[in-house]
């Protein structure tokens, strides 16, 4: 069956599928945001992109701004430095910033696709605590998208984002000469520092140390895990995702 035909058939039947919560977990550049954006546009999931939430919050924060969580103070300046150096932000800080939005969506019984979250077991515990108040475990699915460190460095170091909405533009022969985002027309930019090769390697190490264990956490909670090879083109990866969702 052709890819577009497959999408058309699924679009008509998707409301009847039981999967309501999808997590994309994978290293930097594995295509989490791209796949989540396609699911959002095609099938009505709300795409909760953690990196956009965090980036806007920490980059727009005023000097000396902080929040207190469970008696501990978290300064935005310090979290910003972690961000720039490719380190995982403090898990309570991250969970605090996204939990309110998650609860709002859950109360409305929205279908949610997460890209880049949770990034730690602490955050996974906090999110699952909210989600289980509104959804069943068999309505949840985790896609573990895998690429190696070399591909992560290549993809991220060449990737650009748009200035307005922070769309990620894939690097290939068709996009290499683009100067403006084809979706909103804003200038295309590189994320200075964050997507430097050495920073990407550090981000990959942080993923393996703090985020990868989240997969076993979800598995031990009885949530379905599906592995996906992220080294293929986005279309092929999405076909593989759809074949799993069809089940």
Image: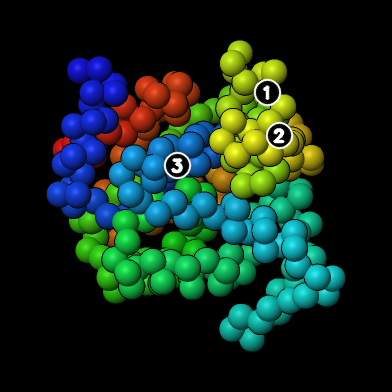
Question: At 41% across and 71% down in the image, what residue appears?
Answer: 104
Q: Position of residue 10 (x, y in %)?
A: 21, 35
Number of numbered discs: 3
Q: Position of residue 122 (x, y in %)?
A: 50, 66
Q: Is residue 1 above or below residue 153?
A: above
Cβ–Cβ under 8 Å for marks 2 and 3: no
**Dot 1 surroundings within 10 Å: few (below 14), some, or many (20 or more)?**
some
Does label 2 or label 3 sit earlier along the sequence? 3
Cβ–Cβ under 8 Å for marks 3 and 1: no
The residue under label 1 is: 178
Quadrant in the rendering for residue 77: bottom right
Name the secondary structure under disc 2.
strand
Name the secondary structure under disc 3.
helix
Cβ–Cβ under 8 Å for marks 2 and 1: yes
Left/right placement of residue 150 relative to residue 116 reads: right
Q: Quadrant of the N terminus?
A: top left
Does label 2 or label 1 sit earlier along the sequence? 1
Which residue is at the far front?
185
Nearer the observer, 29 or 184: 184
Q: Position of residue 150 (x, y in %)?
A: 62, 24
Label 2 to label 3: alpha-carbon separation:
18 Å
Which residue is at the far bottom?
71
Question: At 70% across and 43% down in the image, what residue appears?
Answer: 163
Label 3 to label 1: alpha-carbon separation:
20 Å
Left/right placement of residue 86 relative to residue 204 reads: right
Name the secondary structure under disc 1.
loop
The residue under label 3 is: 37
The residue under label 2 is: 188
Question: At 23% across and 23% down in the image, what residue appears?
Answer: 5
Which is more foreground, mark 3 or mark 1? 1
Residue 112: image tag:
none
């Amino acid at each position: 069956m052709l890819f577009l035909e497959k999408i058309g058939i699924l679009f008509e039947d998707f409301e009847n599928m039981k999967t309501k919560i999808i997590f994309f977990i994978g290293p930097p550049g594995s295509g989490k945001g791209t796949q989540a954006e396609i699911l959002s546009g095609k099938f009505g999931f709300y795409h909760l992109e953690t990196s956009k939430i965090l980036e806007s919050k920490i980059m727009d924060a005023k000097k000396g701004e902080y929040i207190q969580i469970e008696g501990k103070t978290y300064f935005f300046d310090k979290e910003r430095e972690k961000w720039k150096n490719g380190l995982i932000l403090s898990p309570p800080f991250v969970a605090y910033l996204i939990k309110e939005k998650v609860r709002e969506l859950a109360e409305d019984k929205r279908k949610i696709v997460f890209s880049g979250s949770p990034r730690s077991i602490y955050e996974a515990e906090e999110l699952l605590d909210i989600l289980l108040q509104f959804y069943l475990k068999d309505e949840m699915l985790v896609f573990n998208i895998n690429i190696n460190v070399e591909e992560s460095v290549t993809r991220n170091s060449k990737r650009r984002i748009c200035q307005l909405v922070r769309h990620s533009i894939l690097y290939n022969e068709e996009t290499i000469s683009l100067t403006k985002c084809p979706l909103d027309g804003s200038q295309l930019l590189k994320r200075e520092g964050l997507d430097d090769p050495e920073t990407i390697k550090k981000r990959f190490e942080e993923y393996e140390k703090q985020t990868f264990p989240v997969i076993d956490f979800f598995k031990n909670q009885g949530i379905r895990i599906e592995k996906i090879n992220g080294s293929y083109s986005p279309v092929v990866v999405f076909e593989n995702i759809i074949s799993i969702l069809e089940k």
